Amino acid sequence: MDVGARLKVVRGRFALSQRELAKRAGMTNATVSLIEQNRVSPSISSLKKLLEGFPMSLAEFFTFEQEMAVPSYIFPASTQPNLGNASVQMHLVGSGVTERKIGLLREQYQPGADTGSEMLQHEGQECGVLVSGHMELTIDGQVHLLQAGDGYYFPSNLPHRFRNIGAGAAEVISANTPSSF
């Protein structure tokens, strides 16, 4: 998915200039411009910060203007938008669902990939299971090493970060509530 082009379309629909969006998000106009030109790929936390300027969730951003004629309860892998990037893919299960209460992600981390230098924090609770690979999960300053089959559950207002410490790709199935995507 072309994040830059999508951001430009959404910004246009909200009738915001790059300068106004940058001001609302606490970023520079140059950063917004570089993202829209796909010269810079925003981190998840940077994209969430930008979307707060509309305001809009990640799920709304990636499903903007999608219309579903008939409610769907099955979401094939090909229809799950990637909310991440090439090294950390976060596929949202159930895109297009209105009044989302749970955020369910199928996450894939390439070797050495992480959720970013900034610790994540958001309202609610988060849980998941490492399906394959080896991950380092830092929660509120405590570092935990996970292997396939290990699970986690924590208040997501605590600063946290995920990092693949294995030689191969790692896959996580995670959920959070209230949905922050």
Image (cartoon, rainbow, N blue to C red):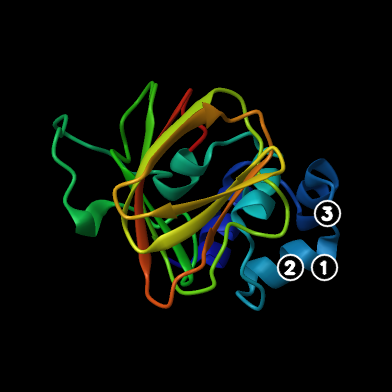
Q: Which of 168 and 106 is in front in this view?
A: 168
- Give me the disc on residue 33: 2
Distance, label 1 to label 3, CA atoms, is 8 Å
- Give me the disc on residue 22: none
Residue on which the image places disc 1: 30
Q: Position of residue 109 (x, y in %)?
A: 44, 65
Amino acid tagged 3: Met
Q: Measuring 18% from the left and 44% from the top, which residue is drawn there?
A: 75
Element carrying mark 1:
helix
In this view of the protein, can residue 55 be seen by the observer? yes
- Give me the disc on residue 27: 3
**In this rendering, would 29 be left or right of 112?**
right
Whichever of callouts 3 and 2 sits on the residue coming sooner in the sequence is 3
Category of crowding for the residue at label 1, using alpha-carbon neighbours closer than 10 angstroms: few (below 14), some (14–19), many (at least 20): few
Element carrying mark 2:
helix
Q: Measuring 16% from the left and 51% from the top, which residue is drawn there?
A: 76
Category of crowding for the residue at label 3, using alpha-carbon neighbours closer than 10 angstroms: few (below 14), some (14–19), many (at least 20): some
Q: Position of residue 20 (x, y in %)?
A: 81, 47
- Residue 107, by quadrant, is bottom left
Q: Nearer the viewer, residue 14 or 121?
A: 121
Amino acid tagged 2: Ser
Callout 2–callout 1 Cβ contact below 8 Å: yes
